[in-house]
Amino acid sequence: MSFNPDLMKGSTAPIVLRLLGEREMYGYEIVKVVNERTGGALQYKEGTLYPCLHQLEADGLLSSAWRDAPTGKQRKYYRITRKGRAELAARTQEWTQFSAVVTSLLMGAPA
């Protein structure tokens, strides 16, 4: 299954915030979790994920730290901030309302 990239754009940040609300992760780990949890329906690429991570960090919604991986390489781990948790709550509420309205319109029922 493949989704229109325009649909994906609006969902990347809330998904990333949600996953990092569970635990801190490094970039490729986020990609793997999204792919696993969606059965491959959402497949993030570096060009989608990393600009989103950098923007969320610039906005103060995430913080990051470099750490040694078991392989000996350095990985940049991201963690949600208090401001990020508040933003996640707001975006979750907004997404719920938005998706209900769009579903209603597409299915031909009044909102």
Image: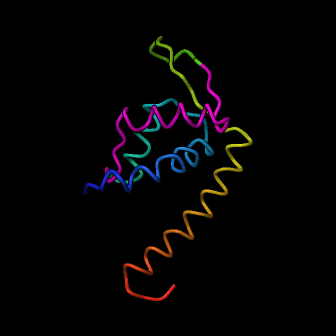
Q: Where is residue 35 in the image (x, y as percent from the top left)?
A: 37, 46
Name the residue nearer the viewer: 73 or 82. Answer: 82
Quadrant of the drawing holding the N terminus: bottom left
Q: Does the magenta stretch include residue 69?
A: no
Q: Which residue is drawn at 50% across and 14% down?
A: 74
- Left or right relative to 8: residue 24: right
Give x and y (percent) for residue 9.
42, 49
Q: At 70% from the left edge and 38% from the top edge, which residue is drawn? A: 81
Task: Indicate the quadrant where residue 20 lies.
Answer: top right
Q: Which residue lies furthest to the right in this view?
A: 82
Camera-nearest residue between 104 and 36:
104
The answer to which of 90 and 30 lies nearer the viewer is 90
Q: In which quarter of the image is residue 104?
A: bottom left
Magenta part of the chain: 40-65
Of residue 83 and residue 59, the one placed in the foreground of this image is: 59
**In the displayed structure, would residue 1 be above or below residue 58?**
below
Residue located at (63% from left, 51% from top):
88
Q: Give the residue at the far top of this rendering.
A: 72
- Residue 59 lies within the magenta run: yes
Q: Which residue: 58% across, 17% down?
A: 67
